[in-house]
Amino acid sequence: MRRISVFGATGSIGRNTLDLVARAPRGSYDVVALTGGANIARLAADARRFNAEIAVTAYPEKLDALRDALAGSGVEAAAGPEALREAAARPADWVMSAIVGAAGLEPGLEAAKTGATLALANKESLVCAGPLLIETARAAGSTILPVDSEHSAVFQALVGEDVARVERLIITASGGAFRDWPLEKLATATVAQASSHPNWDMGQRITIDSASMFNKALELIEAKEFFGIAPEKIEALVHPESLVHALVGFCDGGLMAHVGPPDMRHAIGYALHWPDRGPVPVERLDLAAIGRFTFRAPEAARYPALALARRVMEQGGLSGAVFNAAKEEALTAFIENRIGFLQMAEVVERVLDAVSAREDLENAVISLDNVRAADHLARQTAAETIARAV
Ligand code: NDP
Ligand code: MG
C-alpha cells in the first residue's frame, strides 16, 4: 500500500489526482493528508471518502467549519500555513504538490525533505526557488516528477537520453482564449472572457494565465530550472489543438514529440505510476479524424509575458521569485477589476525593473528566507504600481 498525500486536493489537479486514486484497485493507496483552501465541503467529503489521516485548510478561520464537517469521521482537522508544513512533513511515499501559487513552495519543500516522491504541478515553486527545491530533494533522496503536461512530456521524451545531447526544447501553447482576437481588442478583455480556455479545463488563475501567456512564461522558466537546459535552447510554439504537448530536439536533428489528449490525468497518472506505466482513462486520439496538427510562432506583441520570461531566465537568481509574486498580484488585481488585461504585463515589467534596480537579484543566494523577502518586496512594489496604474 503506497502512502500518498495531495496538497491542493480541492483544486482542478487535486480532484483529477483523487479521481485516479479512486479508480485504483482497493488497497492500492493509503491517504495521509489532503489539503484545501476555502472549499471545506469538498475537502471534508474527500477526507471521509479516502479515510485520510488529516485534512488541512490553508485558512485558520475555516478550522471550526472543517472540524464540524469531519465530526465523527476520525479524520484529524488542522488549519494554516504551519499545519500545511506539518502535514507535508508526515511520512508518505508520494506527494502531489498542487496548491496554486507561491503558497505551494513551503509544503513542497517539506515533502521533499522527507524523501517522498514529489509529483510537482505547482510550477511556481520551481520559478521562485528552483535551485532550492531541487537541492533539497537531491539531499533527501526525493525524486521530483513534473506534472505540468509540457514538462511531463519532455520528461517522458528524455527517458534513456542524455540531456547534454538536447539541442532544443519546444514547449507548446494553445494560445489561450484570445489567440485569434484583433490586438486592439485585447485591452478590453474581461475576466469572464479570459477565464474560458479553448482546450483545457483548469483552475481560474492558470486559465487567465494561459490567455496572457504568463502560464507559458512560467513554464519556460520551469523548464530551464527543472531540466537544467540553457535558456536559448528553450522555445514556446503556438499549437492551437493542444495535442502535441512538447518536443525535444536532439543533436542529430531528430525531434521527439509527445502527443496526447488535453487531459491532465495523463501527466498525473504518469507521475503516479512512475517508473512504470499504468492504465489511465483518458480519451484515445483518433489521429485520422484529427487530420492535422498546426503550429505557429507566438506573436511578441500579443504575448509580452514571453519576453519577460526570457529576461528572467537570463537574469536568474531571485528574479523568478519577483516575477512570480508580481504576476500573482497583477493577476489578482485583474480578477478584481482593478487593472485591465494588458496592464498585467506592464505591472510585472515595472516591478522587475524597480526591484532589480534596488537589489542584486542575480547574485543573491536562493535560500528560503531570501525567496520570502524577494516575494514580499515584489508584492509590495506591485501593490504600489497597481495603485498608481488606476
Ligand atoms: P485550482 O485553483 O483549481 O486549485 C488550487 C488548490 O490550491 C485548491 O485546492 C485551493 O483550495 C488551494 N489553495 C488556494 N490558495 C491556497 C493557499 N493560499 N494556500 C494553500 N492552498 C491554497 O488550481 P489548479 O489545480 O488549476 O492548479 C494547481 C497548480 O497546478 C498550479 O500551480 C498550476 O499552475 C498547476 N497546474 C495546473 C494545471 C491544470 O490543468 N489545472 C496544469 C498544469 C499545472 P480551495 O479551492 O479549497 O480554495
Ligand atoms: Mg502546462
Image (cartoon, rainbow, N blue to C red):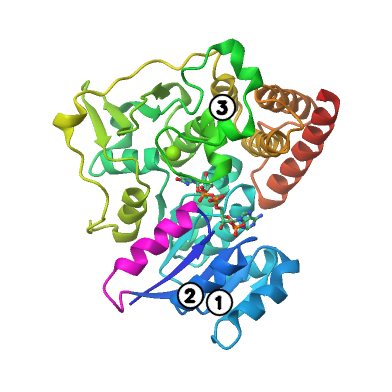
Q: Earlier in the sequence, mark 1 or mark 3?
A: 1
Where disc 3 sits, the SS reads helix
Q: On residue 212, which mark appears? A: 3
* Point 54% across, 85% down: residue: 73
- In the image, the residue with mark 1 has its CB under 8 Å from the nearest atom of ligand 1: no
Residue type at mark 3 is Ser
Where disc 2 sits, the SS reads strand
Q: Which residue is mark 1?
A: 54
Whether residue 112 sits left or right of residue 276 in the image: it is right
Residue 318 image offset from top left, x and y in percent: 66, 37
Q: Is residue 295 above or below residue 371?
A: above
Whether residue 368 sits left or right of residue 115 in the image: it is right
Where disc 1 sits, the SS reads strand
Q: Alpha carbon of mark 2 to alpha carbon of mark 1: how far?
A: 6 Å
Residue type at mark 2 is Val
Whether residue 111 sits left or right of residue 277 in the image: it is right
Residue 291 image offset from top left, x and y in percent: 19, 25
Q: Which residue is mark 2?
A: 32
Residue extending farthest left: 288
Neighbour tally class for label 1: few under 14, some 14-19, many 20 plus, Cα within 10 Å? many
* Point 66% across, 80% down: residue: 68
Could you say which is closer to the camera, residue 323 or residue 42?
42
Highlighted magenta segment, given as a residue range: 12-28
